[in-house]
Image (tube, helix red, strand yellow):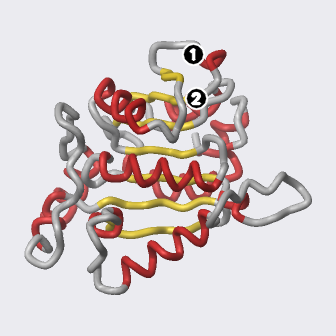
Amino acid sequence: MTFRQICKNKNTDKWMYADAYEQEFFRIRNKPITILEIGVDRGGSLEVWKEFLPRAAVYGIDINPTCAKSKNIFIGDQRDRPFLYDVFHRIGGADIVIDDGSHITSHQQQSLDILFPLLNLGGIYVIEDLYTSYPSPFHSCYVDGISTVDYLKNTLDKLNEGGRSPDTCPIPTTVLSIRFYRGICFFLKKTSRQISQIKLIEPPPTQPPSGLLRRDNALSEDKENSRNKE
């Protein structure tokens, strides 16, 4: 079944991003990966991931205690660094992180800053609902400080100025690409090989806290195997 077909029978609005997810996740549909979604609400989206990515270990985070319907859902704030570190430690790292949480722009940025350095090499970080960066009569304005879209534009500038970003901004150092669709963006993280090729001109990626598991994942291995066959 396609992503859109799966969403029809689930309690979720993920169908809005069906084309984007079909495009970006097509190559990993049968990979043994770990996915963590921020903002699970009634659990419909987690059901979508379990069906669309049948070999994936699926986990969720939500700030609402009523969402704790299984051991795979952790209750906490997406801005809480110690909480997020603990979740990553418990699940053994993540290959995909999807932010469908509060939609408040400062929260989106804080979660990205905390979690992208912890994301497994070759992984994907997704931010949904970028429309909250713009005032609209159809929703309350969620902009808190700089909008997330402007924040991402700044990240693109750092990525394209040659990668010579300061240590206080670790994201561009390990970003392979940033892909935008309507209302959603995907950060692709470099593999270990791609990082080793630039280690002489760029600082190493930010290390996770002591004891946190980090590994090259199925996504990274898939990229390397595909390249070797060419």
Quarter of the view holding residue 159: bottom left
Write down the residue under mark 1. Answer: 68
Q: Residues within 10 Å of mark 1 (few under 14, many from 20)?
A: some
Q: Position of residue 81 (x, y in %)?
A: 41, 38
Q: Residues within 10 Å of mark 2 (few under 14, many from 20)?
A: many
Quarter of the view holding residue 228: bottom left
Residue type pointed to by label 2 = Asp
User: Could you say which disc has been placed on residue 164 in the image?
Assistant: none
Which tag, 1 or 2, sits closer to the chain's start?
2
Q: Quadrant of the N terminus?
A: top right
Q: Nearer the viewer, residue 45 or 116?
A: 116
Number of on-image labels: 2
- Tell me the distance, in whole angstroms, between the alpha carbons under discs 1 and 2: 8 Å
Q: Is residue 159 left or right of residue 72?
A: left
Residue at 64% over, 65% down: 147
Vertical position of residue 14 compared to residue 20: above or below: above
Residue lying furthest bottom: 161
| Residue 26 seen in the figure | no
Q: Is residue 7 left or right of residue 121?
A: right
Residue type pointed to by label 1 = Ala
The reply to whether dot 1 and dot 2 touch (C-beta < 8 Å) is yes
Write down the residue under mark 2. Answer: 62
Q: Position of residue 121 (x, y in %)?
A: 25, 52
Helix, strand or loop under label 2: strand
Q: Position of residue 107 (x, y in %)?
A: 57, 48
Q: Is residue 179 left or right of residue 140?
A: left
Residue at 44% over, 52% down: 125
Residue at 51% over, 37% down: 37
| Residue 99 seen in the figure | yes
Helix, strand or loop under label 1: loop
Q: Nearer the viewer, residue 76 or 33?
A: 76
